[in-house]
Amino acid sequence: MNKKKKIILIALLVISLVLIIIGIIIGIMFYTPKEVLTVTEFKKVAKNNKLTVEEVEIKDQDGNSNKDVKTALNAESELGWKIEYYILTDQETAKKTYDANKKIYSSYKNQLSEEKETSRKNYDVFTLKTQNSYMHVCRVENTLLAINADDENEKNIEKVIKKLFIWLIHKT
């Protein structure tokens, strides 16, 4: 083999290795499962952002305590918007609840709306911004965060969501 062919072969091998390494890094970044946000961490982030946290009881259609919901908390701001936090019995129930919230939120979609959705191994995130509303639902395993607020509170809400997600990202 002459010198020119050897150089081309080495260059192709190096490029192939770099592409494989980039693929592995991207795969790890996008497919790494998120950890569940605990009640303690949710309360801590809420408190640090001056939100008032209260436990709520979720009723089923018959007015009884909903057995699919293990924990339900609302973190409310002084401005009136709130983040709902749920721990559900299992991932399947959480996924169904996520899908139901997404369907409700999507019904408000119009031509001027901005929509974003991400789904990975153990989590789903859906955000819809309309002319008047900001809606966000996020599921990680069997936990769920849901927000439906006026668009004027979007920046404050996103600040809190980012802090919740920073916690999730650093835990993975």
Image (tube, rainbow, N blue to C red):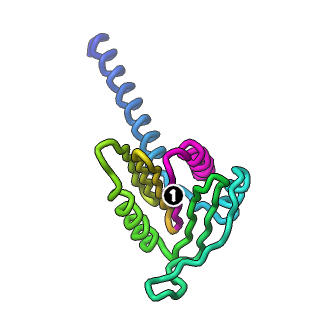
- Above or below residue 24? Residue 78 is below
Q: Quadrant of residue 7?
A: top left
**Quadrant showing the N terminus:** top left
Query: Where is residue 63 drawn, in percent x and y?
Result: 50, 87
- Above or below residue 95? Residue 29 is above
Quick check: 169 left or right of 25? right
Q: Nearer the viewer, residue 16 or 93?
A: 93
Quick check: 3 left or right of 74? left
Q: Amino acid at mark 1?
A: Ile
Q: Nearer the viewer, residue 133 or 43?
A: 133
Query: Where is residue 168 drawn, in percent x and y?
Result: 58, 52
The crowd level at tag 1 (other Cα within 10 Å; few <14, some 14-19, many 20+) is many
For mark 1, give the secondary structure: strand
Query: Where is residue 60 drawn, in percent x and y?
Result: 47, 83
- Above or below residue 19? Residue 166 is below
For the point 37% across and 47% down, the residue is: 115
For the point 54% across and 85% down, the residue is: 65
Q: Nearer the viewer, residue 143 or 13?
A: 143
Q: How many marks?
A: 1
- Above or below residue 18? Residue 35 is below
The residue that mark 1 highlights is 147
For the point 58% across and 58% down, the residue is: 82
For the point 39% across and 25% down, the residue is: 14
| Residue stretch rendered in magenta on the structure | 143-172
> Dominant secondary structure of the magenta stretch?
helix
Query: Where is residue 143 drawn, in percent x and y?
Result: 53, 66
Question: Magenta stretch: residue 65 in it?
Answer: no
Q: Quadrant of residue 105?
A: bottom left
